[in-house]
């Protein structure tokens, strides 16, 4: 599943391409993924101008001039593909299959937005786990997920002190599980949890209550570092994801520990191992990252 940097990369690509586009028509193939009444589509989507593209955690929001928004979650196999036949511009983001480059719509296309300039945005999803919903913009904060999700880790308003306080609520959890908890912090998944914990020299199996505030502050800064670097590099080269230019991101080329099992730790030279923590494959240096009891 895409993590925060991958979804942010998609947001930036869409922002560049679809703001100020006017929706001419909409088609969708299954009510579960686009459950709104046809009247809402006719009144609030068709004829609307796209005014903004936002992200909260791993969710995208495409805002409309009608004060409605399209809320999108790509999940495991979702894609967003923009096609403009007039200038031959094509942009693909999401699960890397042939729908990114083939003629659309195809059998995986769930929603098609046609714009008045002849371009179109396609939401594809082979396995139908993802979704796109049309809803009043003012109601988005009331979605159950939005009510529960933690702060944005790259927000200027998010401080080390707040991070320490929030993760401290999971004091009896192993720290990797706490990082993966979206109610603690938004958008952190397996890749960036491993990378951040290695950077802070914290073993993923250490209980939160056994990590000092000084170490937690270091972890806060490592989280911000690896997320910012990944956004700069266009996301990770995760097997199920490509970045906003339709290419695999390059972050994994710069990863220090993730998928580096069998290779020397770039800090001390000890061979990196892969184990399981919090039910997830986990990459660690046993010398740099020791469990504190």
Image: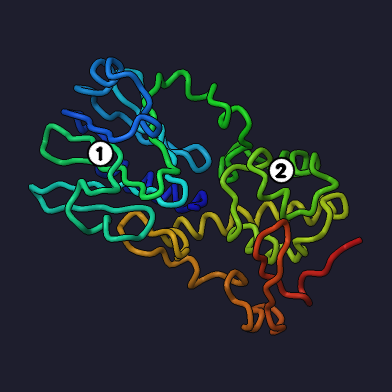
Tags 1 and 2 touching, CB below 8 Å: no
Q: Is residue 21 left or right of residue 251?
A: left
Residue at the image point whose x is 21% and y is 23% from the top: 46
Circle number at residue 18: 1
Res 64 quadrant in image: top left
Q: Is residue 255 left or right of residue 38?
A: right
Q: Is residue 283 left or right of residue 211?
A: left
The x and y percentages for residue 52 are 34, 32
The x and y percentages for residue 129 are 45, 43
The residue closer to the viewer here, 27 or 172, is 27
The x and y percentages for residue 144 are 58, 27
Image quadrant containing the C terminus: bottom right
Q: Are there few (<14), some (14-19), or many (20+) residues within 10 Å of tag 1?
A: many
The residue closer to the viewer here, 8 or 189, is 189
The residue closer to the viewer here, 33 or 138, is 33
Mark closer to the observer (1, 2): 1
Spatial CA span between label 1 and label 2: 35 Å
SS of the residue at dot 1? Answer: helix
Q: Earlier in the sequence, mark 1 or mark 2?
A: 1
The x and y percentages for residue 181 are 67, 45
Q: Is residue 163 above or below residue 262?
A: above
Residue furthest right as drawn: 293
In this figure, which residue is indicated by the disc labeled 2? Answer: 163
Q: Is residue 255 above or below residue 265?
A: above
Q: Are there few (<14), some (14-19), or many (20+) residues within 10 Å of tag 2?
A: many
């Amino acid at each position: 599943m895409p993590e925060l940097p991958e979804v942010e990369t998609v947001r930036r690509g869409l922002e560049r391409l679809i703001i100020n586009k006017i929706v001419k028509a909409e088609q969708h193939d299954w009510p579960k993924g686009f459950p709104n009444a046809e009247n809402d589509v006719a009144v609030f989507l068709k004829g609307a101008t796209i005014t903004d593209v936002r992200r909260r955690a791993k969710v995208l929001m495409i805002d409309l001039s009608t004060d409605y928004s399209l809320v999108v979650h790509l999940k495991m196999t979702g894609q967003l593909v923009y096609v403009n036949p007039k200038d031959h511009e094509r942009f693909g983001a999401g699960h890397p299959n042939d729908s990114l480059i083939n003629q659309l719509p195809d059998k995986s296309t769930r929603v098609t937005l046609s714009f008045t300039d002849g371009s179109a945005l396609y939401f594809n999803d082979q396995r139908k786990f993802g979704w796109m919903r049309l809803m009043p913009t003012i109601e988005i904060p009331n979605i159950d997920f939005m009510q529960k999700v933690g702060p944005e880790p790259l927000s200027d308003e998010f401080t080390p002190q707040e991070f320490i306080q929030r993760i401290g609520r999971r004091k009896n959890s192993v720290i990797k599980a706490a990082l993966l908890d979206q109610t603690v912090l938004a958008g952190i998944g397996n890749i960036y949890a491993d990378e951040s914990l290695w950077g802070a020299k914290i073993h993923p199996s250490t209980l939160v209550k056994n990590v000092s505030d000084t170490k937690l502050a270091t972890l806060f800064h490592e989280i911000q570092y690896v997320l910012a670097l990944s956004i700069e590099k266009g996301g990770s080269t995760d097997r199920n994801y490509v970045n906003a230019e339709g290419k695999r991101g390059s972050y994994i080329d710069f990863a220090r520990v993730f998928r580096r099992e069998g290779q020397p730790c770039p800090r001390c030279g000890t061979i990196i191992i892969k184990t399981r923590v919090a039910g997830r494959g986990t990459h660690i240096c046993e010398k740099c990252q020791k469990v504190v009891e």
